[in-house]
């Protein structure tokens, strides 16, 4: 089931299985992008912690909180780096929260995987968001 804006409605849960269920439910081109992003995160951080909360996959480091959230919107996928203001260079999209920065993925975007890997590595090294 998709919520408004095309975000999958997935039961909350810890681990890879709920994240994979979310990715499988992503509509259209977003599914391939979600698979690619998840594989990139796994390659970058083999011990990454995963969960789905608030209908969004979260990625984190055990004992440090969550460093990245993913959310589908109608025209893009939003990557929320919860401590993104500490990353260099900062992800390009500002948030109302002074600590959070966003990166948006649109259907025809060409990803700079090296930059994403660098942000993922940096974000995993700082204490993350703890709800």
Image (cartoon, rainbow, N blue to C red):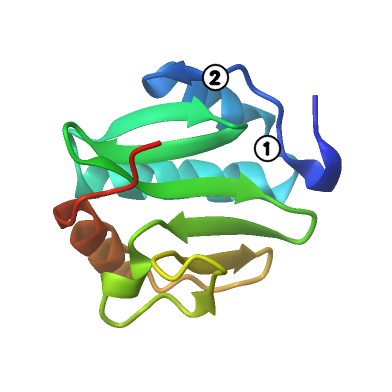
Q: Residues within 10 Å of mark 1 (few under 14, many from 20)?
A: many
- In the rendered image, residue 49, in percent from the top left (x then y), is placed at 28, 31
- In the rendered image, residue 18, in percent from the top left (x then y), is placed at 50, 20
Q: Which residue is mark 2?
A: 12
Q: Which residue is mark 1?
A: 26
Q: Secondary structure at mark 1?
A: loop
The residue at the point 57 percent across, 22 percent down is 21
Q: Secondary structure at mark 2?
A: loop
Number of the front mark, 1 or 2: 2
Q: Quadrant of the N terminus?
A: top right
Q: Quadrant of the C terminus?
A: top left
The residue at the point 48 percent across, 57 percent down is 80
Q: Is residue 72 left or right of residue 110?
A: right
> What's the mark number on residue 107?
none
Query: Where 82 falls versus 89 (above or below)?
Result: above
Q: Is residue 119 left or right of residue 109?
A: left
The residue at the point 47 percent across, 16 percent down is 13
The residue at the point 41 percent across, 42 percent down is 38
Counting labels gives 2
- In the rendered image, residue 20, in percent from the top left (x then y), is placed at 50, 26
Name the image quarter holding residue 4.
top right
Q: Could you say which is closer to the camera, residue 40 or residue 87?
A: 87
Query: Where 108 falls versus 33 (above or below)?
Result: below
Q: Is residue 77 left or right of residue 110?
A: right
Query: Where 115 falls versus 57 (above or below)?
Result: below
Q: Residues within 10 Å of mark 2 (few under 14, many from 20)?
A: some
Question: Which is more N-terminal, label 2 or label 1?
Answer: 2
Query: Gap in Å between the C-alphas at discs 1 and 2?
Result: 16 Å
Residue lying at the far right of the rendered structure: 4
Name the image quarter holding residue 76.
bottom right
- In the rendered image, residue 68, in percent from the top left (x then y), is placed at 39, 50
């Amino acid at each position: 089931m998709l919520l408004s804006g095309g975000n999958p409605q997935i039961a909350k849960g810890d681990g890879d299985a709920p994240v994979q269920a979310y990715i499988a439910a992503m509509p259209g081109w977003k599914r391939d992008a979600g698979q690619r992003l998840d594989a990139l995160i796994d390659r970058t951080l083999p011990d990454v912690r995963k969960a789905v909360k608030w209908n969004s996959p979260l990625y984190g480091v055990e004992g440090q909180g969550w460093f990245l959230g993913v959310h589908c919107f109608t025209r893009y996928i939003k990557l929320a780096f919860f401590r993104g203001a500490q990353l260099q260079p900062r992800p390009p999209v500002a948030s109302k929260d002074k600590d959070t920065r966003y990166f948006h993925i649109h259907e025809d975007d060409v990803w700079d995987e090296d930059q994403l890997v660098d942000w993922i590595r940096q974000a995993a090294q700082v204490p993350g968001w703890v709800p």
